[in-house]
Image (cartoon, rainbow, N blue to C red):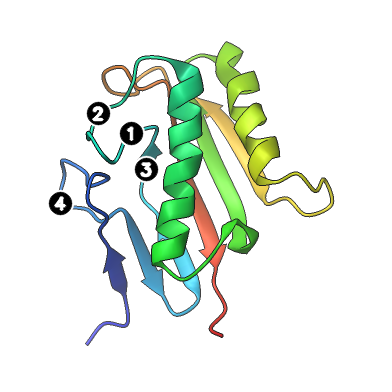
Amino acid sequence: MSQRRSLEIPGLQHENPIPVASQIGPFLVTSGVFGKDPNTGMIPPDIETQCALMFSNLRLILAVAGGSPDDIIKMTVWVKDKSLRPHVNKEWLTMFPDEHSRPARHSLLNTDLPGVALVQCEMMAIIKAE
């Protein structure tokens, strides 16, 4: 029997048969996380709201897994246009205000994000058992 646990969160599910995140022991890795409103299942059209929702969704995923933003070790962020980076950075600094305690991050351009999506991320976290 697999030790892997798939995390499914209502409102954040994917169209494809993949979980929102997968966890084995202390290791948590997400699939693509969008700025999707989990109450409506919709992605709003503006970058500010998408970024706020994307980081909020990360917090939700971490909470379901028993973790917090302090457990994130690496994030990868894709933006549809590089000019959108300051909006990501605003939420990044809110989530990680201590410049001496931030996860690694890689930001990339992805002009193929679906529909109105302007930003997407993945993250890896290590959640220690209490």
Which is in the foreground here, disc 4 or disc 2? 2
Give the number of the disc on residue 17: 4
Give whichever of discs 4 and 1 has the lower sequence position.
Answer: 4
State the SS at label 1.
Answer: loop
User: The disc labelled 2 sits on which kind of residue?
Assistant: Met
Give the number of the disc on residue 36: 1
Q: CA distance from mark 4 to mark 2?
A: 18 Å
Asked if labels 2 and 3 touch by Cβ distance under 8 angstroms, the answer is no
- The one nearer the camera, 126 or 53, is 53
Give whichever of discs 3 and 4 has the lower sequence position.
Answer: 4
Residue drawn 26% across and 18% down?
115
Q: CA distance from mark 3 to mark 4?
A: 13 Å
Give whichever of discs 2 and 1 has the lower sequence position.
Answer: 1
Report which residue position mark 2 lands on: 42
Q: CA distance from mark 4 to mark 1?
A: 18 Å
Which is in the foreground here, disc 4 or disc 1? 1
Report which residue position mark 3 lands on: 32
Which is in the foreground here, disc 3 or disc 2? 2
Where does the image place residue 109, in percent across and percent down from the top left? Answer: 51, 22
User: The disc labelled 1 sits on which kind of residue?
Assistant: Lys
- The one nearer the camera, 13 or 107, is 13
Asked if labels 1 and 2 touch by Cβ distance under 8 angstroms, the answer is yes
User: The disc labelled 3 sits on which kind of residue?
Assistant: Gly
Where does the image place residue 60, in percent across and percent down from the top left? Answer: 42, 53
From this view, report whether residue 130 is shown above or below residue 68: below
State the SS at label 3.
Answer: loop
Image quadrant assignment for residue 125:
bottom right
